[in-house]
Image (spheres, helix red, strand yellow):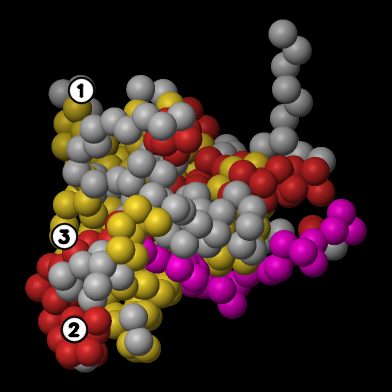
């Protein structure tokens, strides 16, 4: 088998994904424009959803897991954040929990809607849909079960048991109500399904609901103001929108390397956490003149003991 040639283009692209295409469609287009195979994204957006889609190119693909990190938490339990706006349409449930699916149930919620106020809906949200919650992934999600994505099984008419998973709703704002439409803004941990939150809100209000106009407005420290329109990118100008690899670690503690750290990066050696402590909490990104050399994370075992850090990712020595 021929070896794939190493990547020659490296960086981060922040795209404002339009509706009507998949996240993988965006990746494919960027691959063609850059003539580069090594491109990946940091989190799937539904075809009908729009907004922030972060793409890593070349070495940046190895740092994608740090893009949604925000200060706080730990390596074992990082705080991740993605922010969405959406409309929750009360009275109708669909097969996909969004506007693209077939109607599976309707509910007469006219009495509920007549009595509904911003304050009353906010009370329901605050009591049930904020903080740490358990959420069952929808069958139309990209989550894999036994090697196959749930949405692929759903298209075959197969429904499988899904375990509820812990997610965190950092903030759930009820922005406005117009007739049977509740407009919301949700800041949540990675892995949260907004369509499931919408369905849950419909049930909690005494009926059912689906989501529409879903837009991701922020991923970690990146928001729509950082993004470029996919339609404006060409082979000639895409390089101007490519951000340096160092942008991938903007939320991490930054460490300037000395000779000791350089030597550890070169051979993958562990170092005492104290070497990095003055720079802030873990993980620690070793950055030299704008180049990311490595990311160190806490590490311990019976050989090295406690209070050590290892280069979890090495990009350059």
Which residues, given as a range, are shown in magenta?
209-236
* Mark 3–mark 2 distance (CA, rounded to whole Å): 31 Å
Percent position (x, y) of residue 95? 39, 50
Of residue 241 and residue 298, the one placed in the foreground of this image is 241
Residue at the top extreme of this rendering:
1
Sequence-first disc among 1 and 3: 3
Is residue 76 located in the magenta-colored stretch of the structure? no
Q: Which mark is residue 303?
A: 1
Q: In the image, 51: left or right of 164?
A: right
Percent position (x, y) of residue 83? 40, 69
At numbered mark 3, what does the secondary structure look like: helix, strand or loop? Answer: strand
Q: In the image, 44: left or right of 80?
A: right
At numbered mark 1, what does the secondary structure look like: helix, strand or loop? Answer: loop
Quarter in which the N terminus is drawn: top right
Work out whether 302 lies above or below 229: above
The residue carrying mark 2 is: 111
How many dots with numbers?
Answer: 3
Q: Residues within 10 Å of mark 3 (few under 14, many from 20)?
A: some
At numbered mark 2, what does the secondary structure look like: helix, strand or loop? Answer: helix
Work out whether 124 lies above or below 309: below
The residue carrying mark 3 is: 132
């Amino acid at each position: 088998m021929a070896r794939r040639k190493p990547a020659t283009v490296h960086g981060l692209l922040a795209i404002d994904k339009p509706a009507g295409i998949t996240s993988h469609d965006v990746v494919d287009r960027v691959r063609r424009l850059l003539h580069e195979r090594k491109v990946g994204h940091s989190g799937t957006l539904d075809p009908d959803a729009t907004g922030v889609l972060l793409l890593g190119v070349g070495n940046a693909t190895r740092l994608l897991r740090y893009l949604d990190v925000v200060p706080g938490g730990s390596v074992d339990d990082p705080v991740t954040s993605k922010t969405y706006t959406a409309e929750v349409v009360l009275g109708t449930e669909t097969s996909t929990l969004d506007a693209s699916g077939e109607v599976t149930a309707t509910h007469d919620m006219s009495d509920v809607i007549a009595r509904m106020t911003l304050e009353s809906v906010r009370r329901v949200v605050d009591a049930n849909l904020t903080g740490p919650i358990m959420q069952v992934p929808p069958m139309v999600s990209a989550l894999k079960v036994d090697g196959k994505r749930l949405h692929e099984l759903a298209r075959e008419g197969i429904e499988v048991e899904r375990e509820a998973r812990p997610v965190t709703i950092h903030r759930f704002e009820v922005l406005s109500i117009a007739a049977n439409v509740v407009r919301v803004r949700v800041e949540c941990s990675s892995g949260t399904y907004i369509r499931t939150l919408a369905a849950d809100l419909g049930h909690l209000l005494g009926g059912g609901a689906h989501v529409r106009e879903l837009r991701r407005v922020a991923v970690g420290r990146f928001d729509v103001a950082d993004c470029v329109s996919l339609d404006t990118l060409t082979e000639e100008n895409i390089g101007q929108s490519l951000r340096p690899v160092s942008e991938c670690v903007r939320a991490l503690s930054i460490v300037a390397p000395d000779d000791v750290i350089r030597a550890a990066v070169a051979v993958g050696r562990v170092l005492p956490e104290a070497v990095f402590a003055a720079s802030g909490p873990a993980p620690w990104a070793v950055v030299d003149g704008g180049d990311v050399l490595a990311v160190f994370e806490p590490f311990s075992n019976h050989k090295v003991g406690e209070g050590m850090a290892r280069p979890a990712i090495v990009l350059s020595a």
